[in-house]
Image (cartoon, grey):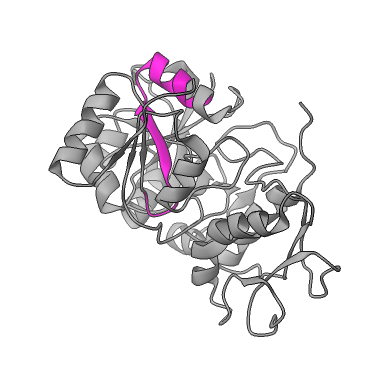
Amino acid sequence: MSNIDTQLLQPDALGLDQAVQILQAGGLVAMPTETVYGLAGDARNDHAVARIFAAKGRPHFNPLIVHVQDLEQAQKYAHFDTNAMTLALAFWPGALTLVLPLRLDSGLAPLVTAGLDTVALRVPSHQVARDLLVHFDGPLAAPSANPSGRISPTRVQHVVQGLWGRIDAILEGGAALVGVESTIIGLSYPPLLLRPGGVSAAQIEHVLNASLATIHPQSAIVAPGQLASHYAPNAAVRLGVMQPLVGEIWVGFGPDCGGAALNLSPSADLAEAAANLFHLMREADLLAKGQASIAFAPIPSHGLGAAINDRLSRSAAPRPRC
């Protein structure tokens, strides 16, 4: 799965037509979304989905998010109860993924759900992603467009660095505005927060008028993004650091980190920090040069801070041995 002639496509009529042709032929196209760039393949095509796993080096037990153009299309693949409809109407299109009971006649490739009887669905809000989904007129499996376990891509150059020569095309779309992956909600009872992300738990609880349960870190994988070690740079990572070690690459947050090499948000704006997270993680990894460790300043846990801290804790987790 190497030495593929990767194309860089513009988000115009010609580029979208080329992307659709590639997808219809079972190829892979990295597409922009408001959260991160996704590696898209036809979710109904076993070969295409297998190629996603191969390109990313992704464990086959980790299911994929299926992106669709609207709620009507989503209902072809999953059963929606009252809570699911409420959340879809409130937050779609947007940075929310719903894990729902799979329809027996969905036609989705079994690898998409990793053999589970549920499917993760999302309607993205990024205009280029929406244009591609409308032109393709089908479901696209699209995990983040990076080697599995590594830093998620929020800009085209990140995809180029990680997957050039391993996928068929990259569709330009600018920098991701949200910058962290979608929130994932399981619609069991009570509704379950499977992964914090671009929509806060407080927003979801307000719409549902109910509290969200949380999943135990060691629970079986039932949705994307649950691997303990994930989003990891090559360098070791330390968290909650206000006094970095000598030689450590310090990534600050807020105005009290004047000596930091990088700062997620000098003004302590969590939205800015989320948008910068993966980009600055890559910058810090380059500065570390495979020798120094990376130290992150404390991040508040409210709002988008929960998603940021989730990604940071996974980046700092012990790495699986090959």
Where's residue 189, x and y in %? 56, 42
Where's residue 50, x and y in %? 47, 18
Q: Residue at x 21, y 32 (%)?
A: 18
Q: Evaluate whether residue 194 shows in this view.
A: yes
Position above or below: 264 against 292: below
How many labels sit on residues? 0
Where's residue 187, x and y in %? 50, 41
Q: Residue at x 61, y 69 (%)?
A: 302
Magenta stretch containing residue 37, yes or no?
yes
Q: Residue at x 40, y 49 (%)?
A: 156
Report the front residue among 299 and 73: 299
Position above or below: 305 against 76: below
Where's residue 257, x and y in %? 70, 80
What range of the chain is rendered magenta?
A: 33-53
Position above or below: 181 against 284: above
Report the front residue among 188 and 216: 216
Q: From the viewer's perspective, is 56 left or right of 253?
A: left
Q: Residue at x 34, y 20 (%)?
A: 44
Q: From the viewer's perspective, is 28 left or right of 322?
A: left
Report the front residue among 255 and 259: 259
Q: Toward which corner of the image does residue 244 lie, by quadrant?
A: bottom right
